[in-house]
């Protein structure tokens, strides 16, 4: 029996109890120790991105392996692990060409003839697993290709946020943008993902790092994490300010909000040859584009889902960055809350004021 925050209907989470199945051949049963609250969860909770219900959200987690299936080779009981929603099959076109974040992970789902991974505690009905993780629960039953073992010295509450926000922000800098030392990076939106991108830009040796956010508190955090300049996104002359700071536009503009206006801003502040990377989950009818002059100027536009991670390699490296004092997860995490306070945590997220809230399980 495991306590979980269940999305019964759009609007909010309910604390309830569930029962997890025994691990199948390639599955891992994990005692969840911490799970970050991610904006993507909120999209599902608010119904902006539809999902069959009931289901358990949560996908930014760390924990300790309790049991493994007969074929599992990558982790063993007692291992400390971080989960990642970029579950990969290992043999599709995307996996074998090094773009495993694009893998749809079809082989990592439970076999159709196997019992559901999660059931109501009384056994009456299945509860849906979200993104093949469902980490707002004391236990997770996931495919071995959805987690990676990390250094046991790493605190698990900080390890959790590496699983989504930090992997996405840092992966965008290292994998998708391949920032060259000295280049200028602008980050639109300083939530968990944006702050991680700023911190990673500093680690990568970016020249100027410009944080763009309407909230002063977040701009301050961004400067603690490595931003050299901060601009209020809501001022009329925001674009002019960025153009001036960057000497005619930035090499890399990273959008980490998921709004039309911030994506358009990312395109607008590019210098010739610059690249805009859109990370935010925008409303499904949104479109971002380059004009004729932008294209003649060699500007580029890209998505970078989950930071185009290769998480089995990237996550242990990010842990190492933290252990060496390079990656500042302590600043990115605003608060630790019990599972019972999860709805309050999401309310705070809607207000836009805090960095990352993390649910900790005892
Ligand atoms: Zn996420
Ligand atoms: Zn694949």
Image: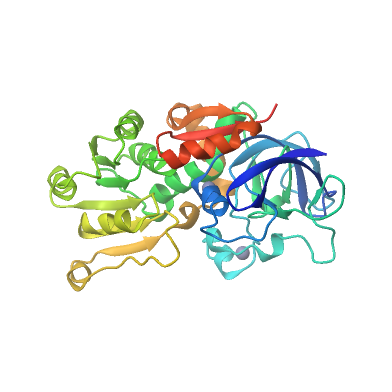
Position of 43 with respect to 353 (left or right) is right
Q: Judge by depth and name the residue closer to the eye, 46 or 273.
A: 46
- Quarter occupied by residue 114: bottom right
Residue occupying the point 70% across, 59% down: 108
Residue 207 seen from this side: no
Q: Judge by depth and name the residue closer to the eye, 168 or 352.
A: 352
Outermost residue toward the bottom in this view:
292
In the displayed structure, 52 sits above or below 247; it is: below
Position of 224 with respect to 335 (left or right) is left
Q: Judge by depth and name the residue closer to the eye, 272 or 335.
A: 335
Residue 238 seen from this side: yes
**Image position, residue 87 (x, y; %):** 63, 56
**Image position, residue 211 (x, y; %):** 29, 40
Residue occupying the point 78% across, 38% down: 2
**Image position, residue 78 (x, y; %):** 76, 33
| Quarter of the image where the N terminus is located | top right
In the displayed structure, 130 sits above or below 293; it is: above
Position of 219 with respect to 23 (left or right) is left
Outermost residue toward the right in this view:
123
Colouring = rainbow
Position of 1 with respect to 216 (left or right) is right
**Image position, residue 149 (x, y; %):** 66, 40
| Quarter of the image where the C terminus is located | top right
């Amino acid at each position: 029996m495991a306590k979980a925050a269940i999305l019964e209907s759009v609007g909010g989470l309910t604390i309830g109890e569930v029962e997890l199945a025994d691990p199948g051949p390639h599955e891992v049963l994990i005692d969840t120790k911490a799970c970050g609250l991610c904006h993507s969860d909120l999209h599902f909770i608010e119904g902006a991105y539809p999902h069959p219900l009931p289901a358990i959200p949560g996908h930014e987690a760390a924990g300790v392996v309790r049991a493994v299936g007969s074929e599992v080779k990558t982790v063993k009981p007692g291992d400390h692990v971080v989960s990642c929603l970029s579950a990969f099959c290992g043999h599709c076109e995307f996996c074998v060409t090094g773009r495993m974040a694009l893998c749809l992970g079809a082989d990592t789902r439970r076999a159709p003839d196997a019992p559901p991974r999660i059931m109501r505690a009384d056994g009456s009905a299945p509860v849906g697993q979200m993104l093949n993780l469902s980490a707002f629960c004391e236990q997770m039953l996931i495919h071995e290709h959805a987690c990676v073992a990390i250094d046991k010295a790493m605190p698990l509450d900080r390890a959790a946020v590496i699983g989504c926000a930090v992997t996405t922000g840092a992966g965008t800098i290292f994998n998708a943008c391949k920032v060259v030392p000295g280049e200028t990076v602008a980050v639109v939106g300083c939530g968990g993902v944006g702050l991680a991108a700023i911190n990673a830009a500093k680690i990568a040796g970016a020249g100027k790092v410009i944080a763009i956010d309407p909230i002063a508190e977040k701009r301050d955090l961004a400067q603690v994490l490595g931003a050299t300049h901060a601009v209020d996104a809501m001022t009329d002359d925001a674009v002019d300010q960025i153009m001036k700071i960057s000497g005619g536009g930035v090499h890399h503009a990273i959008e980490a909000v998921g709004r039309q206006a911030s994506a358009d801003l990312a395109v607008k502040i590019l210098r010739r040859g610059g690249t805009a990377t859109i990370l935010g989950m925008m409303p499904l009818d949104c479109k971002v584009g380059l004009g004729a002059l932008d294209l003649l100027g060699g500007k580029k536009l890209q998505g970078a889902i989950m930071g185009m991670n290769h998480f089995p390699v990237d996550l242990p490296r990010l842990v190492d960055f933290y252990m060496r004092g390079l990656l500042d997860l302590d600043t990115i995490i605003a608060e630790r809350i019990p599972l019972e306070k999860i709805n309050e945590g999401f309310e705070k997220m809607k207000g836009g004021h805090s960095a990352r809230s993390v649910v900790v399980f005892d």
